[in-house]
Image (cartoon, rainbow, N blue to C red):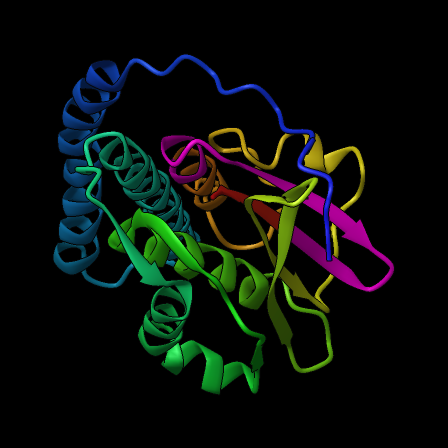
Amino acid sequence: MAANANLEVSPAASIDVDFLHRLLHDLKGPVGRVRMLSELMERRIIGLDPDTKALLGHIGTSVTAAETVLDAVRRYAEAFDWPFRPSRFDLTVSVDSAVSRLMGGISAAGASINRGPLPTVCADLAQMTALFVELISNALRFRSNDPPVIEIAAIPMENGSESTGHIITVADNGIGITDAARQRLFRPLGKATDRAGAGMGLAICRRIAEVHGGEIIAVPRAHGAEFRLRVPG
């Protein structure tokens, strides 16, 4: 089946990776000290009144949130430092590796992963595995009340009789996305909802897609969301 290769995608922002690494270095220390001080206060002050206990709890929660964002920014910055080692392999290998890594979360959510036939591609195996880890994790995080069902498939792209690559689709039956939210999903910290997560996973996916000369977009569905990755032939 032929598919249109003209996928719409938000332009990539110019990223100063050195700045990100410096920022992470400068923030890691103060955030860690705040956690250490709050824990010391909680241990040393005997007979804390309920209000003080609640305040220390709020400090701990805020520090945890800051650490989550810092860890996500670190992963995003590291994605720009990954070596690019393309080889030809069956994309099934990346998907199965990603599923294996996430099996605990998949089992806990009662999720089903349905994988159709996938093509052989010329890509970086580690990076493509990381991309599927992010997309499957995203579907698990933003699931609805129904058990998650994640469908992974491939559509060949053709220009006349010549193959120009594939579109890899990852679709779910989760809470879905709005048309307005999809414009910011692939930006760093571009969260669509207030659910857990720092909003870096899809930005990492976009980085991987761009390194491979491809694109990735999000498409709203009636029930859930679909992500489409274009992989050149």
Q: Is residue 226 magenta?
A: yes
Report if residue 8 is visible in the image: yes
User: How far from the left and from the top, in percent, is residue 84?
Assistant: 22, 38
Residue furthest to the front in view is 161
Taking depth in this image into account, of 82 and 63 the one nearest to the observer is 82
Say if 149 sits above or below 228 in the image.
Answer: below
User: How far from the left and from the top, in percent, is residue 156?
Assistant: 62, 54
User: How far from the left and from the top, in percent, is residue 112?
Assistant: 58, 83
Taking depth in this image into account, of 96 and 63 the one nearest to the observer is 96
Residue furthest to the right in view is 222
Say if 114 sits above or below 151 in the image.
Answer: below
Say if 23 sits above or below 29 in the image.
Answer: above
- Position of 132 compared to 174: left or right? left
Taking depth in this image into account, of 69 and 131 the one nearest to the observer is 131
Say if 104 sits above or below 77 in the image.
Answer: below
- Position of 181 compared to 131: left or right? right
Picture residue at 35% right of the left edge, 64% below the top: 94
The quarter of the picture where the N terminus appears is: bottom right
Picture residue at 69% right of the left edge, 31% below the top: 6
- Position of 5 compared to 198: left or right? right
Q: How many marks?
A: 0
Q: Is residue 137 magenta?
A: no
Picture residue at 65% right of the left edge, 68% below the top: 143
The span shown in magenta is 208-227
Picture residue at 28% right of the left edge, 43% below the top: 71
Report if residue 193 is visible in the image: no
